[in-house]
Image (spheres, grey):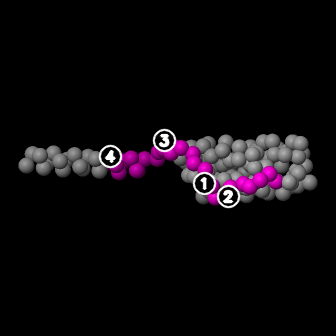
Amino acid sequence: MKKILFAFALICSYGAFIISQHAEEPTTTRFAPVVNQVNQPTGTPTVAYKDGTYTGSAVDVIYGNVQVKVTISGGKISDVQFLDYPKDRSHSVQLSTMAMPILTQEAIQAQSANVNTVSGATETSGGFSQSLQTALNQAKA
């Protein structure tokens, strides 16, 4: 009888632990950034952009807005900066901080708004592409 009660108490404790872990907002990202190969950029674009700095429109995504500013130098994308990103919850901040450098690097490498979606930050990735495209539309030569 003691073994049954002990096993029951152990199972209940484990169940309570699992429930408490899911109820708390995660404090660390539990996965490595993975880039989905959905929108794989192909080739080097032949579009030349006018030098300058251009601000994209703010795009409403699930947990906030995404807005970027692109710097064009020598007719090419040289830098992309986030002016706004989802940051209403700590988990949103973690995902955004994980995704932002990846998206920036992808845009500079692709020289377009056609970037891969970052797993776990799908909405931010989509908002990034849209905001960047509006900025690049202003920069078309």
Q: Is residue 58 visible?
A: no
Can you identify the residue that label 1 sits on?
36
Question: Which x, y percent locates residue 133?
Answer: 78, 56
**Is 90 located above or below residue 61 in the figure?**
above
Which residue lies most toward the front here?
Answer: 43
Residue at point 13% right, 49% down?
4
Amino acid type indicated by mark 2: Asn
Give the x, y percent position of residue 78: 81, 42
Give the labeled residue for mark 4: 17
What residue is shown with label 2?
Answer: 39
Q: Residue at x 70, y 53 (%)?
A: 115
Q: Is residue 80 above or below residue 137?
A: above
Q: Nearer the viewer, residue 126 or 23?
A: 126
Give, as a single range, the part of the protein colored magenta: 16-45
Q: Which residue is mark 3?
A: 27
Mark 1 touching mark 4, by CB under 8 A? Answer: no
| Quadrant housing the C terminus | bottom right
Labelled pair 3, 4 in contact (Cβ < 8 Å): no
Q: CA distance from mark 2 to mark 1?
A: 8 Å
Circles 3, 1 touching at the beta carbon (< 8 Å): no
Residue type of the residue flagged with mark 3: Thr
Q: Earlier in the sequence, mark 4 or mark 2?
A: 4
- Give the crowd class for mark 4: few <14, some 14-19, many >=20 residues within 10 Å: few
